[in-house]
Amino acid sequence: MSIKSSPRTSFRKRVYICLSVLGSLIIFFSIALVFDGPRIRKVEFDAYKITRETNQTILMRSNQLIKALDSSQISINPDVDFSVTTTGEAIIINLKERLDYETNYSIKIKDMQSDNGRSSSYEAKIKTGNASYHYLKRNGVFSKEPTYTQKQPDQIIRGSLNGQDEVVYSAHQIVDFVMLEESLVISQVDEFNEINIIIYDEITKKSKEIMLPDKGTVQNLKVSPNEKLFGFTFSSDKQAGATNDYQQRLFVYDVVAKILVPMRGIGKEYIDAFDWKFAPDGTTIIASTWKTGVIFIDSYSKNEPIPIGSYYNIGNFSRTGSKVVLDTDEDGPIILDLIENKKIVPETQEIEGVLQYITGVKLLQNSNSTLKKTQTLSIGGGASKTAIVVSDGKSNRTIFNIKQKETDITDFGSSGNDQYVTVETSGSVSNKQHDGYPENSRPINIKTRILDMKDSKTLKTIDGFMLTWE
């Protein structure tokens, strides 16, 4: 019997697979309960994607033709939503959700029958690998002059829950970054106070600068889920010698074609957006524009954009792209069901003597639950409290809770498989000092906690922010 995982080109993925071969991913099969029944001789899967993407498959090949199996003959523990297809000697298990990191899974097949009527049962045990991520650590502070004080360069760091952190890139002043398959896209300001965007290859350690449309500033750096596109909004700086008058003009860069293209909106006018995001399909863009409100754009098509309505900041999408979080004036953050064109206002908890407000919402990817940032105020006075709460629509459970006078939650999110929650915290609202960066300014004492979704236990605290799961 042989076990084979799909080859990958990415450094991060190759490391993961190497660790799998060395022992972090262990698969073994028990001896067939009936010796002369069908036996599994080969297993194929993508060791990297199995914890990171949905609709991954585990392909199990028998030593002889077998009769069709149905899902009742296969069990996976811990429980995972899946379907099964049998073709000839192949059993294809389609995983409809991402598996948890560093977890032992048991896959049992009962009464697997060959064409000659003989049967056997098997058990496969899988241990998935550790979670890894990148984050940004800043080491500089701007003052009002403005001058720039820096003890050491800003750093992009790769870490894992059970491993040592490693600096993978450092520069004078890092504004933002996103991750491609084996590279980082980095927005940074150089020693001459000019902003640039580079693609930094983590394997070769070489970087390539992307030609910007003018002299100016870059905001809202985003990457598509398939990592084939990234984009940003650009504003011209006349004082720096800009020849155009861009004001948050939306540009998208095609990583394969190596071209930078301005996006067009309704009436073929160029899009000036104060917020935007890629949809899960990797090509559709949702943008919140100054002129036409929120619109959907196909980055590869010349079709007219679809107007959605008057909303503001754009949150995350559900896994299928059928729902998206948007900010409104009247209701705060809402969930827009794009299929039914219906607004869903997240409900607050009814607590006697307490007023509760929802100030942020994130859609989870492996379920229909949501993460909510809530603020509670006692009607009788006292300090307000801020919390991160997970809700399935029927009940609420607090993941993280703090007093606002002590600290503040600046951002929150979850890993793609919903196993971990990340919470960015800083000093209190009244005593918060920012780093003063011209773009994407953050508190100087910002930290990120990684918590277990199930028991709310803090697993790790890092000195940095913008944690991005691989």
Image (cartoon, rainbow, N blue to C red):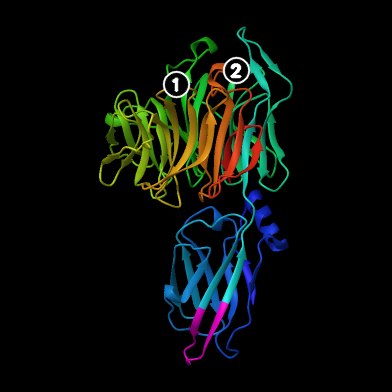
Most common SS among magenta residues:
strand
Amino acid at pointer 2 = Gln
Q: How many marks on residues?
A: 2
Q: Quadrant of the N terminus?
A: bottom right
Q: Is residue 104 above or below residue 383?
A: below
Q: What is the spatial separation of the Cα atoms under label 2 and label 1, in whole angstroms? A: 27 Å
Asked if residue 418 can be seen in this view, the reply is yes
Mark 2 residue crowding within 10 angstroms, few (<14) / some (14–19) / many (20+): some
Magenta residues? 110-122
Looking at the rendered structure, which numbered label has been put on residue 217? Answer: none
Mark 1 residue crowding within 10 angstroms, few (<14) / some (14–19) / many (20+): few
**Residue 59 at x, y percent in the picture:** 53, 70
Q: Is residue 454 magenta?
A: no
**Residue 397 at x, y percent in the picture:** 46, 44
Q: Is residue 365 above or below residue 222?
A: below
Query: Mark 1 sits on what residue?
Result: 381
What residue is at 32 percent from the left and 27 percent from the top?
Answer: 269
Q: Which secondary structure, mark 1?
A: loop
93 or 265: which is nearer to us?
Answer: 93
- The answer to which quarter of the image holds residue 170 is top right
**Residue 89 at x, y percent in the picture:** 50, 80
79 vs 39, left or right, is left
Q: Which secondary structure, mark 2?
A: loop
Query: Mark 2 sits on what residue?
Result: 433
